[in-house]
Image: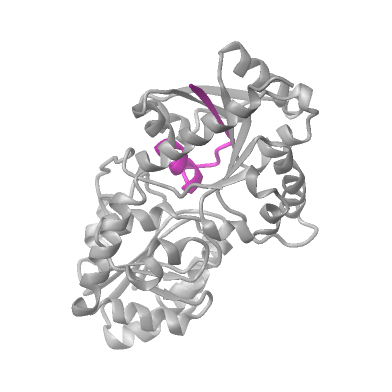
Amino acid sequence: MKILHVIESGGFYGAERVLIELMLGIKVLGHDTALLSFGYKGQKEKEFETICRKYGIEVNSMRVSKLGSFCINQYIKNFAEGNSFDVVHSHGYKFNIIFGLMPKRNRFKCICSTVHGYVSAPIYSRMALYQYLDKYALKQLNRIFLVSQNMTSLPNIQSLASSQYAVIENGIGGYSPECPVDDRLNHFIHNKTTRLMGAGRLAAEKNFDSLIETLPKLIEHDPNTGLVIFGSGPEEDRLRNKIRLLDLDKHVLLFGFVESLLSYFNYFDVFVMPSITEGTPIALLEAMQARLPCVVTDVGGMPHMLGHGRGGWIVPAKDPIALQIAISKSLIRSHNQIKINFSYDRAMHEFNYLHMSRQYVSEYKSVLAVTSLPM
C-alpha cells in the first residue's frame, strides 16, 4: 500500500509526533508512505518537514497563495492519483473540510482522517465555525480514526455511524531523538529538591494555571520546590504574568519548545498534566516510559492510559487543591513504585508505535476493500 498523509503543521506538537510515529511504523511494516505538507507562499521549510526528512520520510511541500488554497482538493487528488497512492490520510480541520465539502466525484477515491482532539471553542469564533463544518465533513469521508475511546462521546463523533469510525490509541517508540540538555535546566534546578515537570502547548486547554497554583502550598512543605513547563504557545505571556503576580519567578521556569523531552525526564521527580481536554497525549506516554510518577486530570484518554489509577494519580480538572494533594502523594517513594512499574509496562506494550501502525494498516485494508467494490 501507499499512504499519503496530509497536514498543515504549525509546529511540532502532539498531532505531528503521532504522525511521524505512524509513518515510521508503516515503513517498518513494509508499506510506502509520504507526507504532503501544506503552507502558504513565502513560508520557509517547516520544523515538521525538517524532522521528517531527517528520519528518511518523503516530504512533499505544498505552498500556495490564499487564492490557490481554494484549489487544494484538486491538487491533492491529482498528486495522489499521479503517484499511485491508495489512501489519502488527513490530519486536521482544514483538509477534512476541504475534502468533505467536495462532491464525491471530485474527491480522491479513499480519504481517511485522524481526529487528534477538539478544543473548546467560543461560540461565534472561527474555531467554532470550523468545528461545525468538520461535523458535516467527517460524514463524507471513508473512515475516521479517534485516538481515545473517550472521544466517541464527542458531538461531532456521535453524529457518525459507528461503522464509520475506529478507535486507535497513539503509540510511541519509532521516533526517539536524544537532544542535548539545555544549560538553562541545570542552572534552574541545581538547588531544587522537589522537581516537577509539565509539558504541552501553552494554550487554554492545557490548563497550566492549575499546576502553577499548586506551587505556594507545595513550597510550604519544601521551599526548594521547582516547576519546569516545556512548550510554547499563545498563553505564554499571560502565564508569565501570573507567575510574576504570585511571586513564583524563582520556582517556575517556562522552558519553551524542545524537539524531544526524552533527555529531560531523568531530571524530575513527577510529571504533571493538568489539561481540561486531551486525547492520548504523547508526553504522558513518554513520561510513563521514562518511569516517572504521573499526575493527570480525569479527561480524555488519560485515565485509561494510567489504568484508572493503577499507574498514576488522577484528579478532577481545574481543581488545584486536589492536584496539589496528588502531587504530594506521588513524591512518596513507597506510594509510587507499583504505579511506576504498571505504567511503564503499559506504555511499552499497549502504546507501542508498531501496535498502533498495525491497526491503521488493517483499517486501511478494510476501507480499500470496500472502496474497490464495483458500484
Please state the total of marks drawn on the protein image.
0
Q: Residue 164's x, y, as percent?
A: 65, 43
Q: 367 or 296, which lies in front?
A: 367
Q: Is residue 14 magenta?
A: yes
Quarter in which the C terminus is drawn = top right
**Residue 345, located in which quarter of the rendered image?**
bottom left
Up/down of 31 relative to 237, above or below? above
Q: 5 or 8, which lies in front?
A: 5
Residue at position x 27%, y 43% in the image: 179
Residue 268 in view in this figure: no
Residue sitting at the far top? 82
Q: Residue 122's x, y, as percent?
A: 73, 62
Up/down of 90 relative to 286, above or below? above
Residue sitting at the far bottom? 220
Q: 18 or 221, which lies in front?
A: 18
Q: In the shown orientation, is residue 307 left or right of residue 232?
A: left
Residue 139 in view in this figure: yes
Residue at position x 37%, y 23% in the image: 30
* Highlighted magenta segment, given as a residue range: 1-21
Q: Is residue 169 magenta?
A: no
**Residue 104, located in which quarter of the rendered image?**
top right
Q: In the shown orientation, is residue 53 left or right of residue 46?
A: left
Up/down of 12 relative to 239, above or below? above
Q: Residue 213's x, y, as percent?
A: 46, 78
Up/down of 32 relative to 160, above or below? above
Q: In the shown orientation, is residue 153 left or right of residue 250?
A: right
Residue at position x 53%, y 54% in the image: 233
Residue sitting at the far front? 374
Q: Residue 238's x, y, as percent?
A: 55, 66
Colour scheme in use: one colour
